[in-house]
Amino acid sequence: MDVQELIKNQVTSNPVVLYMKGSPKFPQCGFSNMATQILDACHAKYLAVDVLADQNIREGIKVYANWPTIPQLYINGEFVGGSDIMRTMYENGGLQTLLDAAK
Amino acid sequence: MLSAQQLETYITQNLGCDYIKVSGDDGTHFEALIVSPAFVGKSMVQQHQLVYQALGDRMRAEIHALSMKTLTPEAWLKSNS
């Protein structure tokens, strides 16, 4: 299975997926850390994928979303944004609405 | 080392901007406020993608983090009034 199919499978079979550097307990980058804290503040359950553990996913995810940076958040298979957009949406309540609708 | 001014030039070369201000002096982390008519009718993600496209490969190679605020000309006027 090529990496684009693998990613598509991950984001469509899990309601909420966060591609990050490191893990929620041991984030390896400030932006990834902020993303996990935002999701925790929203009491979201999510699949965390450590892109540092797999170089193919680390590069493949940037192509998949046409987005050059990590972290990347997906809800119901849709690319929502990076840490910048997550923070803005968290502040205006839009993120909580999306997360509540995730199934 | 990449400067904020260079980054402004890279963006405005490929994206028509009414206003742009980039700050950051460590060469890899930058903050940008970008106002462009191209953002009209686009979601925040799409607006940011337009900026990344304008930066092309430079974004992948040289820039570790670019946090940005993108506004349409109308939103910018409102925020200034």
Image (cartoon, grey):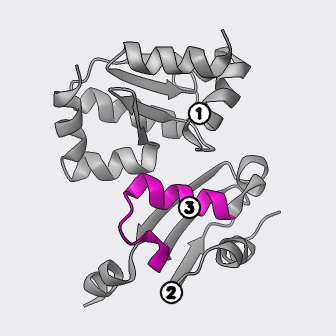
The disc label shown at residue A64, or none: 1
> Could you say where residue B11 lies in the image, as x and y percent from the top left?
66, 71
Quadrant of the image occupied by residue A97: top left
Q: N-terminal of the two: label 3 or label 2?
A: 2
Q: Is residue A91 magenta?
A: no
* Mark 1 closeness class: few <14, some 14–19, many ≥20 residues within 10 Å: some
Which amino acid type is shown beneath numbered disc 1? Tyr
Which amino acid type is shown beneath numbered disc 3? Leu
Q: Are marks 1 and 2 on the same chain?
A: no
The range drawn in magenta is: B34-54
Determine whether, in the image, residue B1 is placed left or right of residue B40: right
> Could you say where residue B64 lies in the image, as x and y percent from the top left?
67, 48
Which amino acid type is shown beneath numbered disc 2? Asp
Query: Which residue is painted at 44% across and 26% down in the image?
Result: A18
Q: Specify the quadrant that holds the C terminus of chain A.
A: top left
Determine whether, in the image, residue A72 is placed left or right of residue B60: left
* Mark 2 closeness class: few <14, some 14–19, many ≥20 residues within 10 Å: some
The disc label shown at residue B50, or none: 3
> Could you say where residue B76 lies in the image, as x and y percent from the top left?
35, 81
Q: Is residue A77 something that shows in the picture? A: yes
Instruction: Check the residue under mark 2 and report the chain it is in.
Output: B
